[in-house]
């Protein structure tokens, strides 16, 4: 956390707020305006974005936001916004570099991500140090894929299924494990095919419920936003079931859950975006910058407002139970209990399923870097084993493991993107100069 905010601020100012200036161009790329089927890559811009979003739009948006508010109070949401906004610039940098330094194999498959731009971009200047950083990042990625990528997901969904439908944790975990294995055995093309359809559906389902609650409680919008901003710098006094917080606790939980939500600076999304079909690395970086906007600034904010509107943040509930309580209370006025009570658990099931798919790809690319192509199947089998174990382990154990493992990815990645920033600035300047010239001619 001490590294992420300064790096995000540095990138934001050095690139002159590219996350705002470049937004329209990013959306044009995503909708296919510049697509060329002859470009080298495995998946389209849209599928690269949805694959990356599938890994970030998960329990962090439902259970993670609730945990941030439980421990840090409403003010934690402000720090999630900060990580989301700065994260847009950080993701632009990392994903551009990943595409620029990616490796295209003889069979047309792509390997890319921080381990490749660390080694290929820094090897000439730093020699063995670059290789050590790349290995640390890859090992961290494998660890995080087991923790954040699957155990945190299966733990939350198993808890939700037990709470709502009294399904045993092991049964949910086993079912999820079988479904995930059936998809990931097909590699990035099958994962991208599924996530490109799943992400819009799950986003609409969950978002529609939040929008209805917000419309039913419009008078609370401004007071809730004022509370978020005020408590971000003062902490929140304990009352009711809330544990109380100081400024440092509020900032710590908001930033930590923000990182968990959008993964900016962690180095995971560049692995997916490296596979995109385009000859311009900056173009894919522009697509990647939209990720934190959707994930943190929109979806997490909707969750937070629902929790604050309904008073569930002060109920003493924790994690996904807090969010489910908030949705049930918020949608009570429309008197469709038979439908509304299923929104959060079904959304969580879809979110968790898509996240495990995205992270399986990140992990097998890291395993391939460390141990070669022969490690892919063994990795996928072990990945599915951890997915099942997460469903029966305790909540705190899973989340603490995930937070610890993220560090092993983030620090090597941030060192690399800062050292390679001059290359990024050159690529960015060349690309936009070319785009400007094409418009003029």
Image (tube, rainbow, N blue to C red):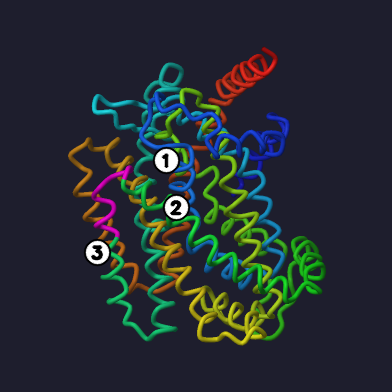
Element assignment for label 1: helix
Q: Is residue 101 above or below residue 336?
A: above
> Of marks 3 and 1, which one's residue comes earlier in the chain?
3
Residue located beneath label 3 in the image: 178
Q: Residue furthest top?
A: 441
What secondary structure predominates along the stretch shown in magenta? helix
Asked if residue 323 lies left or right of residue 384, the reply is: right
Find residue 6 and report its image quarter. Answer: top right
Residue located beneath label 2 in the image: 55
Q: Position of residue 308 (x, y in %)?
A: 69, 74
**Quadrant where the C terminus lies?**
top right
Residues 378 and 329: in front is 329
Q: Position of residue 433 (x, y in %)?
A: 65, 17
Please report contact status of discs 1 and 2: CB closer than 8 Å, yes or no.
yes
Asked if residue 342 lies left or right of residue 65, the reply is: left
Q: Residue at x 74, y 72 (%)?
A: 236
């Amino acid at each position: 956390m001490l590294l992420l905010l300064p790096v995000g601020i540095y990138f934001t100012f050095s690139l002159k707020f590219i996350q705002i200036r470049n937004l329209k161009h990013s959306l044009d790329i995503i909708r296919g305006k510049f697509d060329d089927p002859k470009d080298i890559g495995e998946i389209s811009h849209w599928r690269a974005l949805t694959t990356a979003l599938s890994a970030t739009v998960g329990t962090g948006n439902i259970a993670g936001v609730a945990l941030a508010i439980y421990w840090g109070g409403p003010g934690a949401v402000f720090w999630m916004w900060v990580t989301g906004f700065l994260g847009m610039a950080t993701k632009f940098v990392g994903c551009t570099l990943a595409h620029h330094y990616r490796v295209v194999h003889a069979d047309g498959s792509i390997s890319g991500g921080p381990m490749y731009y660390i080694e290929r971009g820094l090897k000439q200047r730093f020699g063995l140090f670059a290789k050590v950083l790349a290995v640390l990042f890859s090992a961290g990625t494998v660890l995080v894929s087991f923790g954040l990528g699957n155990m945190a997901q299966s733990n939350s969904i198993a808890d939700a299924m037990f709470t709502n439908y009294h399904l045993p944790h092991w049964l949910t975990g086993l079912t999820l494990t079988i479904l995930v294995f059936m998809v990931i055995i097909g590699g990035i093309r099958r994962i991208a095919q599924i996530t490109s359809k799943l992400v819009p559906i799950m986003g609409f389902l969950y978002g529609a419920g939040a929008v209805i609650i917000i419309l039913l409680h419009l008078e609370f919008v401004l007071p809730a936003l004022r509370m978020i901003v005020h408590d971000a710098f003062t902490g929140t006094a304990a009352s009711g079931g809330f544990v109380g917080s100081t400024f440092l606790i509020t900032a710590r939980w908001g930033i930590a859950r923000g990182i968990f939500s959008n993964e900016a600076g962690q180095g995971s999304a560049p692995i997916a975006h490296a596979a995109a079909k385009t000859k311009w690395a900056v173009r894919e970086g522009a697509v990647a910058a939209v990720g934190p906007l959707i994930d943190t600034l929109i979806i997490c904010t909707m969750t937070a407002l629902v929790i604050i509107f309904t008073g569930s943040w002060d109920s003493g509930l924790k994690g996904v139970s807090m969010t489910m309580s908030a949705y049930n209370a918020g949608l009570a006025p429309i008197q469709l209990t038979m439908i509304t009570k299923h929104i959060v658990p079904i959304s969580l099931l879809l979110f968790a399923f898509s996240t495990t798919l995205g992270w399986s790809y990140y992990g097998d690319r890291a395993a391939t870097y460390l141990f070669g192509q022969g490690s892919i199947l063994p990795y996928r089998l072990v990945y599915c084993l951890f997915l099942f174990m997460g469903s029966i382990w305790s909540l705190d154990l899973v989340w603490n493991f995930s937070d610890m493992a993220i560090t092993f990815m983030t620090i090597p990645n941030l060192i690399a993107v800062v050292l390679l920033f001059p290359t990024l600035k050159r690529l960015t300047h060349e690309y936009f100069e070319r785009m400007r010239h094409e418009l003029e001619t």
